Image: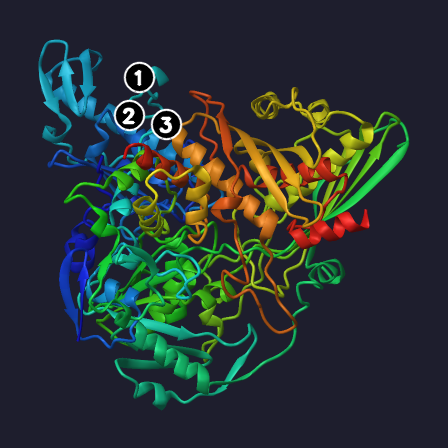
Amino acid sequence: MISFKLNGKPVRTTVPEATPLLEVLAHDFQMNGCKFGCGKSQCSACLVMVDGNPVRSCMAPLSAVAGRSVTTLEGLMNGDKPSRLQQAFIDEQAAQCGYCTSGMIVQAQALLDRNPKPSDAEVRTALDGNLCRCGAHNRIVRAVLRAAQGA
Amino acid sequence: MTLKINPTRRDFLQSTGYLTLAFAIPLEDALSQGTPVSAKPRLAGDLNSTRTLSAWLRVNANQTVTLMVGKVELGQGILTAVSQICADELDIDLQRIQLISGDTALVPNEGVTAGSFSMPYCATAVQQASAEVRAILLQLAADKLKQPTASLSVKDGLIQSTSGAQIAYWDLVVGEALNREATGLVKFKPASEYRYIGRPVQRIDLTPKMLGQSMFLQEHRPAGMLFGHIVRPPTYQAKLLSVNLALAQRMPGVVKVVRNGSFLGIVAKREGQALAAAKALTATAKWKVEKVLPGDDGIFDWLRKTPPNKIIQTKVQPRVGGPVPAKTMQATYYRPYHMHASIGTSSAMATLGEDGVMLIQTHSQSVFETALAISKMLGMAPDKVRCQHMQGSGCYGHNLADDAAADAALLAAAVPGKTVRLQYTREQEHLWEPYGSAMVIQTQAGLDEQGNVLDWDLQLWSTPHGTRPSGEPGNLLSARYLAKPFAMPLPVNAGGPNYAADRNAIALYDFPGHKVLTHFITEMPLRASSTRGLGAYANVFAIESFIDELAVAAQVDPVEYRLRYLKDERAREALVKAAEKFGWASWRKTEGRGRGIGFARYKNIAGYCAVAMEVEVNRQTGRIRVIRAVASSDTGQVVNPDGVMNQIEGGMIQSLSWSLKEEVKFDDTKVLSSDWNSYPILTFSEVPPIDVVLIDRPGSPFLGTGEASQGPTSAALANAVFDATGVRFRRLPLTPERVKEGLGKA
């Protein structure tokens, strides 16, 4: 039995503790805000926050979050409203297919939490481990900067 | 704004309610798919093949309109664009539109969503159909209100007469009124009356994705769903000799182990259990493996030496009379294999229902033809396989989406009544997708004393660019490995006006003599198929690099040199606009920096695009930094300016990634590029600032835009690197190692 907080709520599961966190979040807790991209910690489509730090959930075992607090894209919402950062992504139309988007938003939120006014270069550096294939990079950077300006 | 897309999709999965809707396509249309319609007047876009209005549009009593389209959303924004058009021509608010897209039982068969055809074929059809439905509804209202149609106006579906009488679309008894063929005679609104067309309307599917609401195929989880994984052979040609199935069958959660010839699959209760069992199968499987590949270093020699299946005279225009060339220049350009490299691996869900229908949810670009191919593979009647499109990760062409659909169906057939979802591993996606073909392109120009082109010759060598399912099971990977295998049909090279390997091989420039020869090689060392732009990317790279070489040799500005041969006014404007936006005339060269430009009209019939860029080259490391890039785009009437900019900019970034970094590596046995470390793509820090200038042409045809910028970008890059270093790079990608080596030799 592993207990942890998921988006602020305490949860428990009897799934074997070596199971990848991504599978547990997607399968057992029906989360959409973490996607399978590579299973090798290379693309960050599966990114979530664990105690506020970005973690690639595809390789992290469930046991790694025992007693900790996990936040997915869903957990960034302000109640039923988009967060400032999510709204900035909407305003900038910062995606094409949107498959990488949840990992982008989670990574950017982690950046803004530790650096509320990042420069363009700092945003790019923070997102270098998040792969986008459609070429929405500049829109994504603009969205993060827009959210930072509104803070 | 929320707009319902496939609002009842989950209901489709869970209930049989759709059956009553399955007759939305009148029989006459179903029949006319196979019969020539040439005797009838030519209608706009795909309205020509699916001519009945009710196949496209329904007016619902709940104050909504259902729009049914065969084209599908790939992240390119097509569903938003067609909704804008429908809302404007039908005079309704965008929010009233309910879209059904890519369900083989419900929508017009619009073939494949590819080739930048969705705007010219689907959007054009939707525009005409919407205008005609509006006219029919107005006539019904005129009869009902006993008012002349000329006295009627519409606002958000409410029809009002100048007399004050009014009735809404939804209150009209539409009955059979839309069960008629379009006439092609109804005029569109004037552009000045559009509320949505020409405006940057937000994408209807993006907000849910940004909030974590279910939108992707991977996020649908019907109760009792099982998970599939498959085992691929170690190489393309390998044959399965033996495997321990019983071992896998005993593993936790395993519901079924499937072996059919060299096809191996697992169905289990959880994703991880299916994967673990698949790994166990892999560990015990013995294969017969052959070493047959030329390797990535040998591929270009292989292309030049392998007897082509066909030599195609793509263009023959001998020069008549005139002088003997004073000088001849020649160059050869190389493009390696590229991946689609979707961020999400391909996925599908399949269920063999009690009604004997194999229902497949897929992110395929070709739901109709893939359904047909799968039905043949499974030995089922064509109407017993139904594909429903759901969004997946962007595909950029024919990736593994269709194979995932086929594999999910093979597994689902083994567990009737159960839904099986399959999503490939990253290795499977990288190793087994059909790549964009490697190509060799040789150009030669005969020049006069001043360096003007007299004769232009281009020859290209390529393997196929189109091996989509096309209704043929042999085009599905796993079908080739079954106990009774399906042979792959011989690929063909599509002819004009779109072409395939030779797409954009005919330069748009008006040269006195102009020849293009295509060496089409059907043998495929690596599996290859349609990758964004097909041959256009490499052909434009070669043409636009070579014309830059000619301009340099003639000591003429490369923009001015191109304009000498560019007769098409829209092409000239696109080129000039990009140069102006870049600041071409006022640009001053500094140490280590260079500028370059590239231009093409995609397929010579679609969108115009010119790209200019500035680069800095580090001579010590060979590293290229793209300082900035600009583009111009003329795609006819712009429906969604933000959507067009997103496509042009995204295409440029993807092309920079191809051109700077990407090459599929392989040895004599197998592909070696198995993940993002061994096949790196462009990252945020490497992406330059990009400016896009739109040239809007209200009232002119939609040209499509998704594949316009890739070719011009690659050439602008190589031309800028030449300008910066004085060294011409003709082999893609321009990696630091290759640039450093090239600079060292110079």
Above or below, B585 against B5 in this view is above
**Chain for mark 1?**
B
Q: Earlier in the sequence, mark 1 or mark 3?
A: 3
SS for dot 2: helix
The residue that appears at 38% across and 53% down in the rendered structure is B393
**Chain for mark 3?**
B
CA distance separating discs 1 and 3: 20 Å
SS for dot 1: helix
Q: Which residue is tagged 3?
A: B184
**Chain for mark 2?**
B
Q: Amino acid at mark 2?
A: Asp
Which x, y percent locates residue B466? Answer: 54, 54
Marks 1 and 2: CB-CB under 8 Å? yes
Q: Between residue B662 and residue B574, name the one nearer to us.
A: B662
Above or below, B45 against A125 in this view is above
- Count the marks: 3
Q: Which residue is tagged 2?
A: B88
Q: Amino acid at mark 1?
A: Glu
> Farthest top residue?
B163
- Label disc, if present, on residue B193 of the rendered structure: 1
Q: Residues within 10 Å of mark 1 (few under 14, many from 20)?
A: few
Question: Is any part of residue B55 visible from this angle?
Answer: no
* Of marks 3 and 2, the one in the foreground: 2
The residue that appears at 74% across and 53% down in the rendered structure is B741
Above or below, B573 against B17 in this view is above
> Farthest front residue?
A114
Q: Quadrant of residue B357?
A: bottom left
CA distance separating discs 1 and 2: 8 Å
Quadrant holding the C terminus of chain A: top left
Quadrant holding the N terminus of chain A: bottom left
Q: Amino acid at mark 3?
A: Gly
* Of marks 1 and 3, the one in the foreground: 1
